[in-house]
Amino acid sequence: MEIKAVIVEDELPARETLELYLAKYCPEVNIIATADNVNKALEILRHHSPDLVFLDVELPYGNAFDLLEQVGAIYFETVFITAYEQYAMKALNSDAVHYILKPVEIDELIKAVDKVKRIYEEKNALEHLEIKHIKDYSANQNKKFIFPHLYGFDLIELNKIVLCKADDNYTEFSFLDGNKLLISRTLKKVEEQLSEYGFFRVHKKYLINLNHIKSYRKGKAGSLIMVDNSEVLISPNRKTPLMLMLE
């Protein structure tokens, strides 16, 4: 498989060495662009769709973490390459696939690329599962959920709920008619009440009604478009169980 990659490195010799190593030892990696500062890298990442970014930490006009923050939703895998070992923990906490210290060792580079290959092979296998037969949870969704308020409570049928979104110690419900309702209950508590009725936690912030998925969009872990046209991100660790439920 081909892996489209971008190199973000401000030192020309280091950039050229990395390109040579990749061409010789990792021929499946196709370098589609390079950048030598944060601003140029941001422009490239906004106009291209790389699978992988080799990212130096210290850069002109900022650093790697500034860049990732400005990109927003990360749709690519990241391999950090730097001379500064103290960045290792922060890099790994940024969901980096691998961390390589300079000077780059060929074995470490091959190991990093192999990790990325495995990630995309798993993703491709999941994305080729056709969402043909969403399990029918509607039989259980004629039940009603209690929504407390100052004057008592309302009872609303579960099949009218599109999704639930965490808001600190509150949960915001979105309904088919476009209305929203905030209740004083954590999403974890709501999940405990609704998980057996066709609701699934796809992200730490989102619990969705499986009956109201409209489509799936590819990405680092992908996202779901719901029937109300809202877009919900999928956490990487929730993608496999979700796809298996939808297959």
Image: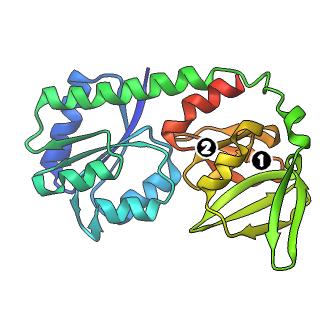
**Residue positioned 10% across, 33% down in the render:** 105
**Residue positioned 89% across, 56% down in the render:** 156
Mark pair 1, 2: CA separation: 13 Å
Residue 84 in sight from this viewpoint:
no
**Residue positioned 12% across, 38% down in the render:** 104
Residue 36 in sight from this viewpoint:
yes
Looking at the picture, which amino acid does disc 1 mark? Met
Q: Point out the image quarter for the N terminus.
A: top left
Residue 20 horizontal side relative to residue 197, left or right: left
Residue 245 horizontal side relative to residue 88, left or right: right
Residue 89 horizontal side relative to residue 150, left or right: left
Q: Nearer the viewer, residue 103 or 128?
A: 128
Q: Mark 2 points at which residue?
A: 202
Q: Nearer the viewer, mark 1 or mark 2?
A: 2
- Where disc 2 sits, the SS reads strand
Q: Point out the image quarter for the C terminus.
A: top right
Choose top left, top right, bottom left or bottom right for residue 201: top right
